[in-house]
Amino acid sequence: MKNVKNVFLKDKFEELLIANWTQFLDHSKLLAFVLFKIQEEANNLTRIEVEEKPFKGIRITISRFSFAKNGFVFWVDFIAPFSSSQIVEGTMELFLDTSNILETENLNLHNESISCISMLGNIYHLKK
């Protein structure tokens, strides 16, 4: 039988991953990781003054998924309270290592990890 090429629709697969990420990523763990990285990188974020708080609550969305060796690179857009008078908004580039999810000895072993590649963002200081 002849091999068929160009069957996989990478763009459509990315759209599917973006639309359904809460079905295969633990939202609460991802949120905790994002908040941890925000606190860790606070000194590297630009501070900007604003008149009022433009949102309520913490929001994260995934805007991009890309194949990488042994996993995926994905972009998390975030907006979150930073302190009583500050909010933070930006994008984080993360790597999801899936190389150890399935091992021949134990197919139920889930040993994936997420690491931060880079982060861009701003801390908005609310004027009083």
Image: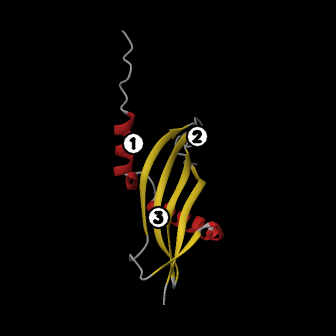
Residue at the image position 55 percent from the left and 60 percent from the top: 120
Identify the secondary structure beneath mark 2.
loop
Q: Residues within 10 Å of mark 2 (few under 14, many from 20)?
A: few
For image coordinates 35% across by 25% down, the residue present is: 7
Contact, CB < 8 Å: mark 3 with mark 1?
A: no
Give the vertical position of 52 relative to 37 (above or below): below
Q: Residues within 10 Å of mark 3 (few under 14, many from 20)?
A: many
Q: Amino acid at mark 1?
A: Glu
**Residue 78, numbered circle:** 3
Q: In which quadrant of the rendered view does residue 38 lie? A: bottom right
Secondary element at image label 1: helix
Compute the Cα span from label 2 to label 3: 27 Å
Amino acid found under the numbered disc labelled 2: Ser
Residue 31: percent from left, percent from top? 49, 65
Q: Which mark is residue 99?
A: 2
* Amino acid type assigned to the residue bearing label 3 in the image: Phe
* Badge 2 or badge 3: first in the primary sequence: 3
Q: Of all residues shown, which one is farthest toward the top? A: 1
Q: Is residue 36 left or right of residue 26?
A: right
Image quarter in which the N terminus is found:
top left
Residue 14 is tagged as: 1
**Residue located farthest toward the bottom when viewing the structure as drawn:** 128
